[in-house]
Image: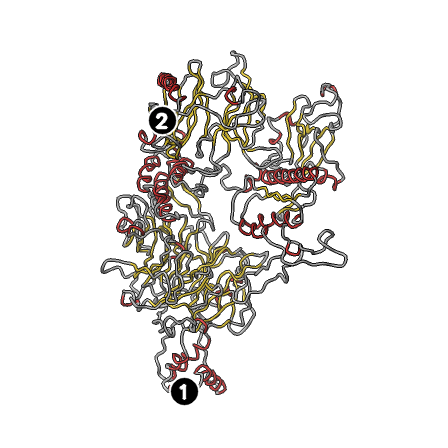
Amino acid sequence: FSAMNEGVGMPDTRLYELQIQHEEQDIKSQFGKPAATALGIHEIPLAQATDGFVHEESKCIYFVRYKQSSNTVRYVGGTAENLWVYCPEMSAAVPLTSDYKGTSKSPRLLSHGGDEYLLFLSDRSATEDGSSWIPNTMELWAMPLPQQSDLYSLNDKTPLDTLNLVKPVKLTQMACDNDGMALKEFAVDAAKNTIILRVGSGFQIVEGPVVSGLMGSLLLHRRRLEDGQLSSTHLMAVDLPILVYSDFNQHHERVRPVKLPSDLVFADVYSTAYKETSVLVGLRGQAYVVPVVDDTSSRMLYEGSSSPMPQRRYRVAPGATTGGLVRILAGLHVPLHEETGERRALLLATDPLSETAEHAFYLVDTQASSNPSFLNVDSLPTPFIGGHINGGSTKDGGLGSVLADSLQVSPCGRRATWTDTDGRICVMSLNVTTGNPRYTVLPTENENGEAMIGDGAVLSWSPAGRYLAIEHQAKNQFSVISIADLGDPVEGSFKKDGRIVQATPSRFNSGDVVWGRMDIDALVDAKGAKEGVTVEGGATTLFFRSDRDIVTDVASPWGTRAPQPHLPKNYGVYALPLLSDEDYAKFNSKKTMYKGINPIMELLSDQLVEESQGSHNPTAAPTLPPTGLPESVPDIPPDYEISFGPEGDSELAFARRAFRLAHIPEAPYVKLVSQCTDDRSLVLVEQVEGKGLSLKVFKSDTKEAVSGDAPGGKLVTILVSTQRDTLVAVYTSSVKIIPNTMTGLKMASLDMKLSQNIADVSGMALSIWPSLEYQQMYSDAWRMLRDYFYDPDMTGIDWPKMHKRYLSLVQRCAKREELDDVLEQLAAELSALHVFVYGGEYPDPSHGDDIWVALNDIGTLGATLVRSVEWNGYVVQAIHERDPDFNMLDGRAMYSPLSDRALSITGQKGLEVGDVIVGVNGESVMSVPNIHMLLRGTTGDSIRLEVLRTSATTTQDGSTSDGSNARHLAFTPEPIITVPISPKKASKLRYAAWEWKTRQAAKDLASKLGFSLGYIHLQDMSGAPSYDSFARSYFPEFNKEGLIIDVRHNNGGNIDSWLLEVLQRQAWTYWQGRATNITNGGLGWGEMFAFR
């Protein structure tokens, strides 16, 4: 069998041999069959061996080399699984299937009539002329078992480089018999001479007589095979009906508690027709409306009589019996143009009326008196766009797959926008009461010729929905902002000749658009009103975050480890005026007064005069209800006409009107959230080192930020309501609703218990019907692969046919693990290595209880232990020691609980190879089946070990050095106090110990050969640890004569280009010191740390 190795080495899969001794026939097990005893488990010393068998007579091991990292089929490459064989006295194993570069795996032995055959799985298929193999469907193959004499040359025991073996014969025809569904695995029952096949999710059996006839047919074909003629036969199998009744409970309804913040998909706040504040929330694919609780700490339980009833929370979609039928991906409140008592939401969901779970948009009623949508399978709603109406891939003219996080509804409620997986930026009118609903796809370039692709784009409507700000990638990969003029939304259509103007240069990253107003706008409004001029009051300024001023914290690239320039992600906040001076001037009836001077400066001058005369009356903040939340939606004025300037301006004069807000210091802001509605303060989220996310509010007249953090929680993210009057702060355990005002944010910072204005999701549970959800998830996965896969042609595969091929298997899935198996088979058809199936909700015996997990976590001692009956304990076979120069690796302490380094500091002596552990906390280790039962729940806690110091008189396997019986020696147990580590840390320790020993072995070998050598091992090529590992090993040894970069079992990543750049550096300069040179620590040619 195969298992992960527990010794000092890379964490890979090895083959192990389990020796079993059958008891006497009169000793029966509980199942009525002869009992058996496991005598021991021994590792088979074959690197990269993952599956195989041992031939009883020759002791040859037929095995699979390599373990493919994914379930990809028709893979031809360096890590394709192949069959190998190793026999005693061979110097090395030899390949059996080297004639084919694809997959050959699962070797099994079949004996028939004195002949032996090697059965295996392979996706090979012969070309038309029979000259070579090409990948196709996985089938069962057979060939005569190579004899030991076939594996050696005639004169010695050296394995042959190329084996002249009989060509294999295909036994099955899966492409014909099972509609192309591949053979997943098989087993041979030697006693009954039968073969069991697993195809899809079912089993098939080949009975003994059929197998006998097949083997006889192979004997007849053997001569032709030896002559090089390809042949095949057809193995007839019949379905094997198996029902596992214990799995039927998986079809029952699951009632799953809501978990924050992981279950929260979306949230939007709106005011009901009854002037109550409600929150539309998406919870794991389902939509609800929940109330806002004023103070959860003083909430009273309803007890009838005169006690107040709690506010109601209710379903929006789906119903109680259809949980899992549909997945709600996004939901936003649609503001009303005028108060009618209605409340609507725009939902993005998978359409259950579509066979392939196509995306669709629905407008649903969210009033408390409404019924849930998708209430039952007989009354499913019809989408107004997408789904079974006009869904499908964009290639076929359908809606495609919408990126749910990109969906935005304009504050006026008249328009929506989104991006999709094909990079499109789409806009749509929400006036769907008349005509055929349609959406418009924006151009892929702005008027300046800059690329404007929807991948990763962030969209933001102007308040009245005329303009759309688009944050997108420029051709040089920097993030820029463009503004699209889509025309008046009241008209219902989009402006055909509307401009799309670039609003920021592509020399830096700019984003997080907030439409707002400057302080000067209040003066303009006041003066215009005084002179009888109608003031519109729309957005006059586009605020955004940008990293224009970059300052490295590395002064020079010279010095040890060749420090690279590091540019911290600090951002400033910028303001782009949308109106020109002439635009401001039009608000005053005496336009001549602005001639030749800056109108803004005159307004400021007028303001000073009015204040000196005592006539200044600042605008009062809006009145707040008791909860501090707005009661109704204010009227939204039309958007101003933006002064873009000349069309196609290559100088970007419009964009370069922007200026930095000096009162907001540059900092690692991760998001510019909003502008307060009462005093034009700006709200930002800052990443504070060691503390996480922090909400900061900056007034226009001070550099000191006002905190908006609720002290009682840890902020995860913050959202803005569609109407932009409310913030939704998501914490690790609750969702807090904050008015988008300076007053509201100040109140939030005083909420010490995180109990005020909380969206009421406490105690909620979701109803899920697995049989419905599995079918939805399968079709959803199929559609996602269709629309996310890099190749729109799906590598030439008939992808709709694949959906039909595996759909029947989904109906048989009784649990999530079986669905994963079906999804793996579906995804494997793409023949792409980077397609995986992982994650999901599986039965959890701990029920999410961290305390229960900790109590059952098995502590480990950082050593290889062997159970010894002779010593009545566990003999220490190896103690895993890391590089002694590193107490910390990747910021984590690493130690072996039994090592002298760990114990000597406490005055104890570490254990050595050959010592024996006989007790744990006063209990004999032989009183339990395995020592780890006594180490359960001990990770991080002190324990007492009773050990025998036998290392001076025993060998590594625990026997005495003079060969005498260990039982005859007398030793006194010695107590040792140590602290076990977790299995995960133990695995990392074993890996580090292997890496250190391998480095030492390489250096020692090079030293014996007379040259210096550097050694670098990289576990992967992604993330900070891979950078750290390379820097830790390369820079101290760059001047060696040779360098080994060990990437065995590398987990992948993409720092390889940077790594190659470092390795290919050249020494461009040479420094000559008076007393120093490259050999004694001077610079010489080594200032660039170039490997020469």
Residue farthest along the front direction in this orientation: 155
> What residue is shown with label 1?
595
Q: In which quarter of the image is residue 1020?
A: top right
Specify the amino acid type for callout 2: Thr
- Give residue 172's mark: 2
The secondary element bearing badge 1 is classed as loop
- How far apart marks 2 and 1 lie (CA) works out to 91 Å
In the displayed structure, would residue 1071 be above or below residue 651?
above
Q: In which quarter of the image is residue 600?
A: bottom left
Q: Specify which label sits upstream in the sequence, 2 or 1.
A: 2
Residue 432 pos. (x, y %): 26, 59
Residue 344 pos. (x, y %): 32, 58
Residue farthest along the left direction in this orientation: 435
Q: Nearer the viewer, mark 2 or mark 1?
A: 2
* Residue at image point 77% right, 57% down: 1075
In the displayed structure, would residue 488 be above or below residue 475?
below
Characterize the local packing of mark 1: few (<14), some (14-19) or many (20 or more) Cα atoms within 10 angstroms. few
